[in-house]
Image (tube, rainbow, N blue to C red):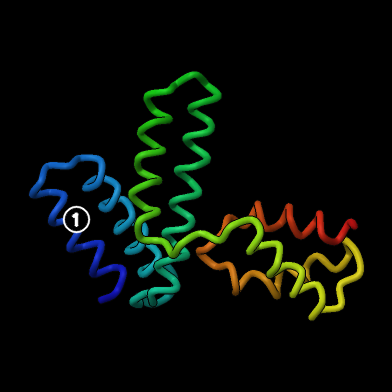
Amino acid sequence: MSIKEQLRLDLTEAIRSRDEIISGTIRMVLSAITNEEVAGKEARVLSDDEVITVLSREAKKRREASEAFETAGRADKAALEKAEGEVIAKYLPAQLSIDDIKKLIADAVASTGAAGPADMGKVMGAVKPLIAGKADGSVVSTLVKEALNK
């Protein structure tokens, strides 16, 4: 079963159980997936990897919005965004730990022969397919900078 099919089944279940946060979040995610499918010259069906990319983007939006509301002193809105992020996270692959990311970066540095900060693009290019949907890109970028500045 594809992720999109699972989302549709879970939406039906959330509507039946009258869970507004889950049903609203899944509707929003399905809408983002549909928008991605119809974007461009011709409509297409997204693969699971592409759906994970959309889910990751939506989860990042929720994380950033939650932080912004927290900073603005809107704890109620921050909690709602955080709850939506948790719903989305259920459909994403398990997130990599910092140690796992560092190991992937070390392997990428060794395989690309990166010597300094100028080679960051090479390392990010090698690491990106391995971490897609499994880690936040900004965290990975920071860790790559640290590794190359040693």
**Residue visible at 53% across and 31% down?**
68
x, y (%) of residue 91? 36, 60
Residue with the mark numbered 1: 11
Q: Which residue lies furthest to the left in this view?
A: 16
Q: Residue furthest front?
A: 99
x, y (%) of residue 139? 65, 52
Total tally of numbered discs in the picture: 1
Residue nearest the observer in this picture, 123 or 96: 96
Q: In this view, does 127 lie above or below 146?
A: below
**Residue visible at 33% across and 49% down?**
87
**Left or right relative to 59: residue 116:** right
Q: Is residue 80 above or below residue 44?
A: above
Q: Residue furthest bottom?
A: 111
**Left or right relative to 6: residue 41:** right
**Residue visible at 44% across and 65% down?**
93
Q: In which quarter of the image is the C terminus?
A: bottom right
**Residue visible at 65% across and 52% down?**
138
